[in-house]
Image: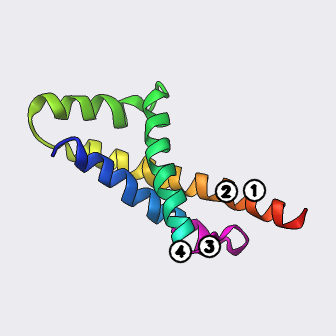
Amino acid sequence: MEVIVPILVQLIAGGIGGNVIGQIVKSLNLGPAGNSVVGAVGGIAGTWLAGMIPGLDGLVGASAAAAGTAGGLDLSALAGQGATGLVGGGILTAIAGIIKSSMAKA
């Protein structure tokens, strides 16, 4: 259970980030389902990448590992994973929207 909750937080936050970008920048909108799916994938990828960056690894990586050894959920790690998932979902949705719109012009 303690492994699934952070993944769900990343997926949900990424989906929200993707939908927010799609609503703010209409030219990057992939539709509600597209924004959600691409955003969810971006949420997982963004959190994974943030764990590899030396300044951010304590926010998502080390705190999550400490939560697993302590036997409980670390709310600060979940908040960090949610924030990085939100940003990652928005970024990947923007990239996919740019690719989609550039292919439509060609």
Crowding near the residue tagged with mark 2, few <14, some 14–19, many ≥20 C-alpha atoms within 10 Å: some
Give the overall secondary structure of the magenta segment: helix
> Could you say which disc has been placed on residue 32 in the image?
4
If you read the primary sequence from the N terminus, does the residue marked by circle 3 or circle 2 appear first?
3
Query: Which kind of residue does numbered mark 2 sit on?
Result: Ala
Residue with the mark numbered 2:
96
On whether residue 20 falls in the magenta region, the answer is: yes
Residue, x 43% and y 41% (percent of image)?
Answer: 47
Task: Please tell me which of labels 4 and 2 falls first in the chain.
Answer: 4
Residue designated by label 3: 24
Query: In the drawing, what numbered circle is on residue 91?
Result: none
Residue 21 horizontal side relative to residue 62, left or right: right
- Precedes in sequence: disc 3 or disc 4: 3
Image position of 52 (left or right of 24): left
Please say if the residues under marks 3 and 2 sit with CB atoms less than 8 Å apart: no
For label 1, the residue is 99
Mark 3–mark 4 CB contact (< 8 Å): no
Q: Which residues are magenta?
A: 19-31
Residue 94 lies in what quarter of the image?
bottom right
- The reply to whether the C-beta atoms of the residues labelled 1 and 2 are less than 8 Å apart is yes
